[in-house]
């Protein structure tokens, strides 16, 4: 019983001294995304969200998961992002940065890179043509939020069926 009486105040002290992360405020805005299929069409390759029609051979399923780079940043990098609203390190563009309070009153900073969907299409094209396909049908894009100890980012899955049209 004495151990419980001693442990309870200690636990309350430890949990009450933990800092709680807060969301970042935003003024909002518009995000525009354009996915350009023209370079594939010029090669006779088709990307479509539709079910294939006519005669075709089913080749396989193609899926690419795009995950951003997540890196711990130095304070100077974090401050540069806040000032310029952008950050590029070693050729990687970071779309977001987050600060996290530590138990000792200091902070640690993380950057989350941008994801380029066009890179996923390039990879899908390469995989599908290597399998002998000339189209990817039933093309889908899915966003999956990932939460890692308070840090939230999105993994994008691009998938479809590789087919060879007659």
Image (cartoon, rainbow, N blue to C red):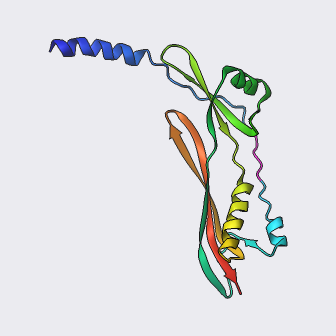
Residue at image x 56%, y 38%? 152
Out of 158 and 123, give the one closest to the viewer.
Answer: 123
User: Where residue 84 appears, x then y in whole percent?
Assistant: 79, 27
Quadrant in which residue 54 is drawn: bottom right
Residue at image x 69%, y 25%? 78
User: Where residue 122 appears, x then y in whole percent?
Assistant: 73, 61
Quadrant in which residue 55 is drawn: bottom right
Q: Is residue 33 above or below residue 160?
A: above
Specify the principal SS of the magenta part.
loop
User: Where residue 64 appears, x then y in whole percent?
Assistant: 62, 59
Residue at image x 19%, y 14%? 3
User: Where residue 147 appears, x then y in whole percent?
Assistant: 52, 40
Instruction: Quarter of the image for the N terminus: give it.
Output: top left
Q: Is residue 92 above or below residue 22?
A: below
Q: Is residue 129 above or below residue 32?
A: below
Figure disc tally: 0
The answer to whether residue 137 is left or right of residue 37 is: left
Residue at image x 45%, y 18%? 18
Instruction: Quarter of the image for the C terminus: give it.
Output: bottom right
Find out whether residue 26 is within the magenta segment. no
Residues rendered magenta in the picture? 29-33
Quadrant in which residue 124 is drawn: bottom right
Q: Is residue 44 above or below residue 91?
A: below
């Amino acid at each position: 019983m004495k151990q419980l009486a001693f442990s309870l105040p200690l636990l309350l002290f430890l949990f009450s001294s933990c800092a709680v992360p807060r969301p970042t405020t935003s003024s909002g805005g518009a995000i525009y995304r354009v996915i350009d299929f023209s370079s594939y069409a010029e090669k006779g390759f088709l990307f479509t969200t539709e079910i294939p029609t006519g005669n075709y051979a089913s080749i396989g399923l193609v899926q690419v998961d795009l995950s951003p780079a997540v890196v711990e940043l130095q304070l100077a990098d974090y401050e540069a992002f806040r000032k310029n609203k952008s950050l590029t390190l070693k050729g990687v563009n970071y779309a977001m940065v987050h600060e996290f309070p530590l138990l000792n009153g200091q902070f640690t900073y993380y950057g989350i890179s941008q994801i380029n969907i066009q890179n996923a299409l390039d990879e899908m094209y390469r995989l599908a043509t290597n399998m002998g396909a000339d189209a990817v049908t039933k093309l889908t894009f899915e966003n999956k939020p990932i939460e890692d100890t308070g840090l939230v980012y999105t993994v994008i899955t691009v998938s479809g069926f590789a087919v060879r049209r007659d």
